[in-house]
Image (spheres, rainbow, N blue to C red):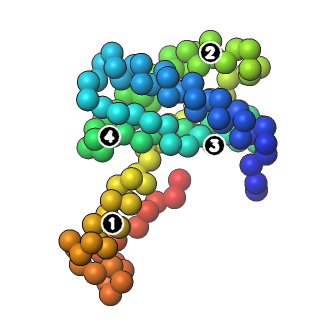
C-alpha cells in the first residue's frame, strides 16, 4: 500500500525533530559518534512510527540502539513537546538500526576486487534482512 501525503509530511516532521533530539543527546554523552535518521515510516493510522537510525562508526550501532530503545519514552516526551502545535497525538516510536551503508560498502569493496568476485559467486555478498 502506498504512503499517503499526510504520512509523508508527518514522517518528515518527525525525522527533522528526531535528528535534533538524538544529536543533542549524542553530543552530551558520546563524543565521536554521528547519528542520522535515515528514514521514518508512519503507519496509516498515525499511531506507530518506525525510525531507522544510521550510526557512524558502525561498530557502535548495537550499543547505541539499545540505549535509544531504553530511553524511548523520554525521546517521545521530548518529541511531543516539540511537535505539540503540529500533531495531535505523538506516535509510538520504534527504533531500528539501518545497515544500508555497510551493505553498500561491502558491494563497493567487492566490485573493486578486494573480495571474491560477486558476479561469479553471488553467495559472497551477505543477504539483507527486511524488517
Residue under the point 67% across and 18% down? 83
State if disc 3 and disc 2 touch (CB < 8 Å).
Answer: no
Residue ID for mark 3: 41
Label 3 element class: strand
Query: Distance between the Cα atoms at labels 1 and 3?
Result: 27 Å
Residue ID for mark 1: 108
Q: Nearer the viewer, mark 1 or mark 4?
A: 1
Query: Residue 34 falls in which quadrant of the image?
Result: top left
Label 2 element class: helix
Residue 54: x %, y % from top left: 42, 42
Q: Quadrant of the N terminus?
A: bottom right
**How many residues crowd around disc 4 within 10 Å: few (fewer than 14), some, or many (20 or more)?**
some
Residue ID for mark 2: 82
Which comes sooner in the sequence, label 1 or label 2? 2
Q: Tell me: 98 left or right of 86.
A: left
Residue 96: x %, y % from top left: 47, 42
Asked if 92 appears above or below 128 in the picture, the reply is above
Which comes sooner in the sequence, label 2 or label 3? 3
**How many residues crowd around disc 3 within 10 Å: few (fewer than 14), some, or many (20 or more)?**
many
Query: Distance between the Cα atoms at labels 3 and 4?
Result: 22 Å
Q: Nearer the viewer, mark 1 or mark 2?
A: 1
Q: How many marks?
A: 4
In this orientation, which residue lies closer to the viewer: 123 or 34?
Answer: 34
Residue ID for mark 4: 56
Query: Distance between the Cα atoms at labels 2 and 4?
Result: 26 Å
Q: Tell me: 18 left or right of 1.
A: left
Residue 111: x %, y % from top left: 31, 73
Amino acid at each position: 500500500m502506498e504512503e499517503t501525503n499526510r504520512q509523508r509530511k508527518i514522517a518528515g516532521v518527525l525525522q527533522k525533530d528526531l535528528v535534533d533530539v538524538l544529536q543533542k543527546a549524542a553530543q552530551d554523552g558520546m563524543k565521536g559518534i554521528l547519528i542520522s535518521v535515515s528514514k521514518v515510516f508512519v503507519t496509516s493510522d498515525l499511531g506507530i512510527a518506525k525510525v531507522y537510525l544510521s550510526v557512524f562508526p558502525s561498530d557502535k550501532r548495537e550499543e547505541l540502539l539499545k540505549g535509544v530503545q531504553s530511553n524511548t519514552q523520554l525521546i517521545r516526551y521530548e518529541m511531543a513537546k516539540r511537535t505539540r502545535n503540529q500533531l495531535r497525538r505523538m506516535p509510538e516510536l520504534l527504533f531500528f538500526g539501518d545497515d544500508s551503508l555497510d551493505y553498500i560498502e561491502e558491494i563497493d569493496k567487492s566490485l573493486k576486487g578486494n573480495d571474491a568476485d560477486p558476479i561469479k559467486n553471488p553467495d559472497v555478498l551477505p543477504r539483507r534482512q527486511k524488517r
